[in-house]
Amino acid sequence: METSIVFAIAIIFFALIVIVKGIKIVPQSDLYLIERLGKFNKVLHGGFHIIIPIIDSVRAVLTSREQLVDIAKQSVITKDNVNISIDGIVFCKVDDAMQATYNVVDFKNAIANLAMTTLRAEIGGMDLDDTLSNRETLNAKLQSELGSAATNWGIKVTRVEISDISVPQEIERAMNMQMEAEREKRAIETKARADKEAVIRKAEAFKQEEVLKAEAIERMADARRYEQEQMAAGQQEAMRLINISMMENEKAAEFLLAKDRIAAFRALAESNSTDKMILPYEVAQMIGSTSVLGDAFFRGVSNGATNNA
């Protein structure tokens, strides 16, 4: 009786172990690779799963999250024989759990070593200046080369980043001197261009000023010519009207002369000068006649004296 109880307890315990071993709860980001009798069977993704204990076993546990593979710092010789130190980081993720398990022993170590050899080959074909300035191009080439090789391992290379590029101190000093000389050169060229532009703009401003002056003189001349033409036309029209008036009325000329005489007398009257004398028109005519008679008399006397002689 006791033997039966022990046997039943053993069976129950064994059954519990089998049940526990047959239940697999896989986290969301993990991948369980299952082998059945030593041969690949399936890959379990996140969730609840049941396998056959003893027959089925977990060969490897991988993650589907993106992983970082560090490229150790190494010395590399560029195309122009400069020894530099360089390191980087490879970002990758498991794309096929079976290939990542069976096609390579350690995919991280394989990617790191492949990245080192590929990096040496790429930098060996580039000058130092290209290596320092074309880091994005170098990253793209490394990602392409590593991606092609890692596809056979079930790994997808998402990106590659060069972390640091170190050059020897003497090369760094030479580069700093070169950069300083280049900056001074650019500063001199910039100043020269600025001075040239200033001279050109000054000349253009002077030219524009002279053009504007010439245009102003031309416009003033046109305005004066137009004014003179209008004045001449007005005087011509006035003379025409005066001629018409004189032909129609004989007293028109006397009226114009009287008008000018009155204006002249008004100007004399308004003048502040003390040495002036205003005579009536009749007195002026008498003085004029007397001067004419005097001239005739003296001319006759001179002629008689000449004949007696």
Image: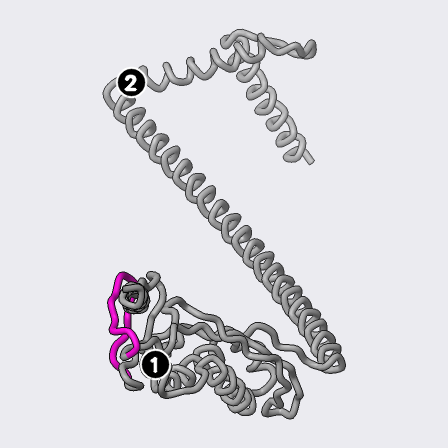
Name the one closer to the observer, 259 or 230.
230
The picture places residue 103, in percent across and down from the top left corner, at 36, 88
Q: Is residue 19 left or right of residue 175?
A: left
Q: At numbered mark 2, what does the secondary structure look like: helix, strand or loop?
A: loop
* The C terminus: image quadrant: top right
Residue under numbered circle 2: 250
Q: Position of residue 207 (x, y in %)?
A: 54, 56
The CA span between labels 1 and 2 is: 130 Å
Q: Nearer the viewer, residue 202 or 274?
A: 202
**Mark 2 nearby-residue class (10 Å; few <14, some 14–19, many ≥20):** few
Name which quarter of the figure residue 18 lies in. bottom left
Callout 1 amino acid:
Gly
Residue lying at 37% horizontally and 82% vertically, measured from the top left: 101
Q: Which of marks 1 and 2 is in front?
A: 1
On the picture, is 110 further left or further right than 73?
left
Dominant secondary-structure state across the stretch colored magenta: strand
| Residue 208 placement, left or right of 190 | left
The structure residue drawn at horizontal position 31% and vertical position 64%, both measured from the top left corner, is 2
User: Where 9 sits versus 97, above or below?
Assistant: above
Q: Mark 1 points at which residue?
A: 154
The image quarter containing residue 8 is: bottom left
Give 81 or 115, whichever is nearer the viewer. 115
Which residues fall within the magenta stretch? 40-54
